[in-house]
Each structure stands twice: as structure tokens, then as C-alpha cells.
Image (cartoon, grey):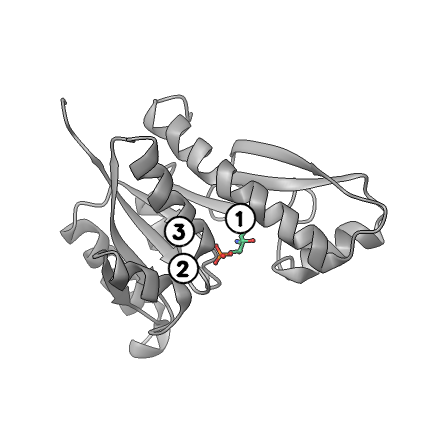
Amino acid sequence: MANHKTKLAVFCSGSGSNFRALHFAIEERNLPAEIVLCLSNRSECGAMAFAVQHGIETLHLSEKQFDGTEAFASAMLDALHSRAIEYVLLAGYLRKVPAAVIEAYALKMLNIHPALLPAYGGPGMYGINVHKAVLEAGEKNSGATVHYVDAEYDKGPILLQRTVPVEPDDTPESLAERVLECEHALYPDALEKLLDGNGS
Ligand code: GRF
């Protein structure tokens, strides 16, 4: 369809630097997509503030507001379906997405992870823990991965991956910084690949 803009929702919990990178890349690369919703489990965070500043609708949705996972999942699905969201991009979303939502968005939900999956993924592997584990193992390379989200944590099919060399004097923090920089180019590249129809 000419001029169709793919409707995206971005899920965040923190600073939202990947969300920002996606937003600016859509503008700069003139991608046929539009972030129509920023959903967060936190009412206040960098991502939500950025969305407000840029006229993107925000939605604070937390399991605590609901009587159980089923009600939470159904509110999340309503929020996505009522806005005709086609793809969900997890960008530093630190909560489990309910299984019913993952199923409804099978091969239509992406996540970015700060390591070369399948290595250094799974429960407990988030934030600085990932980079500490990579350095403790003496790896020569780390990197970032954009993958489809499925029922198994950090195990869905990989869409795009890029290597970041480990420097001899790296600390977990310095490595985290370089990997995050890599993520800011990788996530837009992965989105572009998805929109081009090369994503599966
Ligand atoms: C990134 O390192 C990402 O890989 C992980 O969470 C971090 C999010 O950072 N899933 P930000 O909120 O996008 O700045």
C-alpha cells in the first residue's frame, strides 16, 4: 500500500536511548513507519519524558494495576489492537511480556540485547551483569543482537547481530557504553530490514 506507515509500539522501562535512536532514524532515513505508542511499566522514566516531548502517546501499564496476569495481558492486547499496532519493539523493557501478548505478536515483536546471543542471554543476564560476565570469561568480542521475542527468554530467532571488540583495558562500564553505541545503529538497521520484508 502506497504511503502506508507501519505502526509501531515501543516498550521501555528506563532512559530510552534505543527508543530515541529508533525515533530519529525513522525521521532521518525516511522509513515507512511511525512510533505511535510508548508503553512503560514506569510512569516516569527517560523514555516516557522523551515520548511526551515528541508528541508520541504514552501509556503507563504495570501488572500491579491489575488483578493477575490475565487481566494485565488483556489490557496490553487491547492497547495494541485498538491502535492497530503492527510491530512491538522492546527497548530496555525490564518486565516479562505476558505469554498471550507474545503469542499474538509472534514474529512481530523484537528485542535488543547487549551481547552476542545465544551467549550471555537468559535470566539474570541484563544490564551491567552481561558485560561483567563477558569480561570475566575473557571474551575477545561482545556485541549486540536484535531478535524476535518468543516464549523462551532471549532465545527467539536472530534478526541482526553486530560485533563489538573487547579492549584489553575494558571495564564493564566502558564495554557497556560501546555496546550501547552499537545498539543505537543496530536497532534502526534491524527495523529497516524488517520493513524491507527481509526480516524472516
Ligand atoms: C540496552 O542495553 C538494551 O540492550 C537492553 O536494555 C538497555 C536499554 O537501554 N535491553 P535504553 O533504555 O535503550 O537506553
Cβ–Cβ under 8 Å for marks 2 and 3: yes
Image-quadrant location for residue 47: bottom left
Choose the circle earlier in sequence order: 2 or 3: 2
Q: How many angstroms separate mark 2 from mark 3 (CA)? A: 8 Å
Residue type, label 2: Cys
Residue 90 shows in the view? no
Residue type, label 1: Glu
Image-quadrant location for residue 2: top left
Q: Nearer the viewer, residue 26 or 161?
A: 26
**Where does label 3 land, which residue?**
19
Choose the circle earlier in sequence order: 1 or 2: 2
**Mark 2 crowdedness (10 Å alpha carbons): few <14, some 14-19, many ≥20:** many
Is the C-beta of the residue carrying label 3 under 8 Å from the nearest atom of ligand 1? yes
Q: Position of residue 114 (x, y in %)?
A: 60, 48
Residue type, label 3: Phe
Q: Position of residue 143 (x, y in %)?
A: 65, 40
Q: Position of residue 172 (x, y in %)?
A: 73, 58
Is the C-beta of the residue carrying label 2 under 8 Å from the nearest atom of ligand 1? yes
**Where does label 1 land, which residue?**
152
Q: Position of residue 88 (x, y in %)?
A: 34, 46
Q: Residue at x 46, y 65 (%)?
A: 14
Q: Is residue 58 above or below residue 148?
A: below
Q: Is residue 186 above or below residue 171?
A: above
**Where does label 2 land, which residue?**
12
**Going by the image, does 172 lie left or right of 87?**
right
